[in-house]
Each structure stands twice: as structure tokens, then as C-alpha cells.
Image (cartoon, rainbow, N blue to C red):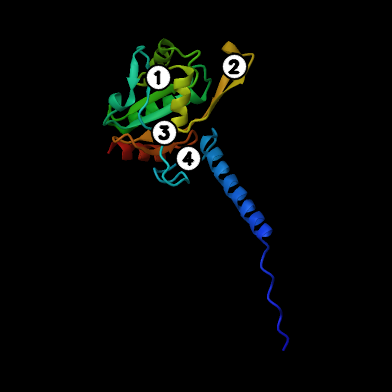
Amino acid sequence: MAIEPPSPSPSPKLKVLRLTLWSLVGLAAIAFAWLLLVRPDAPTVTSRADPGMPGFSLGGPFTLTGSDGKPFVSDKALKGRPYAMFFGFTHCPDVCPNTLGKLAKLRRELGKGDRAFDIVFVSVDPARDTPKVVGDYVGLFGTPIIGLTGSEAEVAAVARQHAIYSAKVPNKEAEGGYTVDHGSQVLLFGRDGKFVSTIAQEESEAPALDKLRRITA
């Protein structure tokens, strides 16, 4: 019986090439996961440990400017309180008012009063959204909403901290000549200040209420 000679082992150059290709595949996968996280249409994150990245976390202490013009220090003002956080802007024609209106309605339906959880609105358009403008805007919804703004750098840092995408888009018909694209998900945090879940823009009321019940239990 003829014995086939053993296959020649890969040359060192071939081994290096294979390692390089696998490294590129790994980097591409990481980049794709990051894009999914920061794009405005990113999928809903359902738990602290389920965004597809080991050790992933959102949020943390931050300081912005409240609608009263005073510094808003989150780890003091929100300490021990569950909250729903949404990034938007006052010139937003539909998504922002619809989302804040939905959160106000959900809080009423929860049946635990306005103090059940805080609604936090962070403007991603600080050039136009001064503290007074933000205060007047959140006052339109007939329920307590914390309105926050800050410098461009401060807002950008807090948006990155919460994995929220935002970008100015030229628009000649809009005031100031631009509008703002931004992530539309609502971020939910428990009493310990830890990220718990999200509410997607298209999510129906029943699952959204279940999530709010969990953070207010």
C-alpha cells in the first residue's frame, strides 16, 4: 500500500500572512460592533451586560447646566433616584417632542406620581438651546422634566459617555441653517445610577412600562 508523504508545513511567511488576516478580521468585527453602538438606529440594549461587549457600561457622573443656569451635578441631583435619560434638541420637529410626551404619559400610567422616576432631557444643540430655552421647552409637557445643556465640549463628552450619536446637518430651511441628527433611544438607570435598559423610539407601551416598573420597584 502506497503511503502518501506528509503535507508540507506552512512556511513562516504564510503563517505571518494568516495571522495578519485574522487580526484584520478581528479589528473589523470590533469596528462593526462600535458602529452599531453609536449609530442613531442602533439596536436596543436590553440589560447591563447585553450590549455585545464584555465589561460594557453606560453613564457615570457628569456635570451640565440646568435650566436655572446653575451647575447640575448628576451624582448629587440624581442620587438614589431612577431616571430616564433622552438626548435631543428643542428645534426637533417630531422625535423629541414625541419621545418626551411618551415618557410623560408612561409615568402617569405607572401610577406612582411624578416622583416615580426622573425624566432627564439633554440638549445636543447647545448653540441654540440656552438654559432658558431648554427650561421653556421642557415646561411645555405639563410634568416635571429636568432640562440640561452646556458648552459644546461638555455636551459632546456626556453624549460619548452615554454612547449617543449626534451630528449637525446643514439645512437651509431650519433656523441657524442646520438641524441635528441624534440617537433616539431612551436610557434607563436604576436607583444605584447604573444603566439598566433602553426604550426604543418604536417600542410599544406595554414593554416600556415593564422596564419602568423594574427600575422603580
SS category of the residue bearing label 2 = strand
Q: In terms of sequence position, does the residue under pointer 2 or pointer 4 come before the other?
A: 4
x and y, in percent, of residue 208 in the image: 40, 37
User: Counting other residues with Cα less than 10 Å from the Cα at mark 1, is it few (<14), some (14-19), or many (20 or more)?
Assistant: many
Amino acid type, callout 4: Thr
x and y, in percent, of residue 93 in the image: 53, 20
Amino acid type, callout 1: Leu
Residue 69 appears left or right of 28: left
Amino acid type, callout 2: Tyr
Q: Which residue is mark 4?
A: 44
- Evaluate whether residue 91 shows in this view: yes
Q: Which residue is mark 3?
A: 187
- Evaluate whether residue 144 shows in this view: no
Distance, label 2 to label 3, CA atoms, is 26 Å
Distance, label 4 to label 1, CA atoms, is 24 Å
- Quadrant of the snapshot with the C terminus: top left
Q: In terms of sequence position, does the residue under pointer 2 or pointer 3 come before the other?
A: 2
**Residues at discs 1 and 2 in contact (Cβ within 8 Å):** no
> Which numbered disc, 4 or 1, marks the residue closer to the eye?
1
- Residue in front for this viewpoint, 105 or 146: 146
Q: Which residue is mark 1?
A: 148
x and y, in percent, of residue 58 in the image: 41, 36
| In this view, 124 is above or below 8 | above
SS category of the residue bearing label 1 = strand
Q: In terms of sequence position, does the residue under pointer 4 or pointer 1 come before the other?
A: 4
User: Counting other residues with Cα less than 10 Å from the Cα at mark 2, is it few (<14), some (14-19), or many (20 or more)?
Assistant: few
**Residues at discs 4 and 1 in contact (Cβ within 8 Å):** no
SS category of the residue bearing label 4 = loop
Distance, label 2 to label 4, CA atoms, is 28 Å
**Residues at discs 4 and 3 in contact (Cβ within 8 Å):** no
Q: In terms of sequence position, does the residue under pointer 3 or pointer 1 come before the other?
A: 1
Q: Which residue is mark 2?
A: 178
